[in-house]
């Protein structure tokens, strides 16, 4: 049989995880420039669904969740850098794909506000509130209030 010997630097998923961790730490440490650059590099490694060739798709749940976390953190870094207009389109797309992800909705609302679009920010809040109420029977959590 064959044996593949690879270091963690040879496996995109491990590199992605390391860069995401480094970028997130930079953001929480108050360095949004490094965070944005590092998280952009991490997300550039991403092509298609995680572990798509594996028959058991449950193995992909963790990397997919980490990708969403990296995307949220990169958007937060962009907002901290004053790049609100740049992230609005991506956040709109993500909130449509993840309608119950309140942190994503909060980022979109903040981006719209920071981009000088307060009416759109209010409309985005109302849309998120309505989605949560109509489909889950709940009010928005603290992050959206």
Image (tube, rainbow, N blue to C red):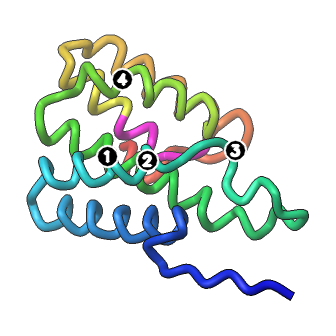
Q: Label 1: which residue?
A: 74
Classify 9 as above or below 121.
below
Foreground tag (4 vs 1): 1
Disc on the earlier residue, 3 or 1:
1
Disc on the earlier residue, 2 or 3:
2
Do the residues under discs 2 and 4 have CB atoms within 8 angstroms? no
User: Residue 113: x, y in percent?
Assistant: 23, 23
Label 4 to label 1: alpha-carbon separation: 12 Å
Classify 136 as above or below 60.
above
Magenta-highlighted residues: 100-107
Q: Label 2: which residue?
A: 43
User: Residue 97: x, y in percent?
Assistant: 63, 34
Local secondary structure at mark 2: helix
In the image, farthest residue toward the front: 1
Q: Label 4: which residue?
A: 88
Is 92 included in the stretch rendered in magenta?
no
- Label 4, residues with CA under 10 Å away: few <14, some 14-19, many ≥20: many
């Amino acid at each position: 049989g064959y044996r593949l010997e690879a270091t963690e630097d040879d496996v995109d998923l491990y590199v992605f995880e390391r860069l995401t961790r480094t970028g997130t730490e930079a953001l929480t440490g108050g360095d949004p420039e490094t965070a944005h650059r590092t998280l952009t590099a991490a997300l550039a490694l991403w092509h298609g669904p995680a572990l798509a060739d594996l028959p058991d798709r449950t193995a992909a749940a963790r990397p997919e969740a980490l990708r969403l976390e990296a995307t949220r953190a990169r958007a937060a870094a962009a907002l901290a850098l004053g790049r609100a207009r740049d992230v609005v389109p991506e956040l709109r797309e993500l909130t449509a794909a993840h309608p119950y992800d309140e942190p994503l909705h909060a980022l979109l609302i903040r981006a719209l506000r920071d981009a000088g679009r307060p009416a759109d920010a209010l409309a985005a809040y109302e849309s998120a509130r309505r989605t949560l109420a109509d489909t889950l029977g709940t009010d928005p959590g603290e992050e959206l209030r």
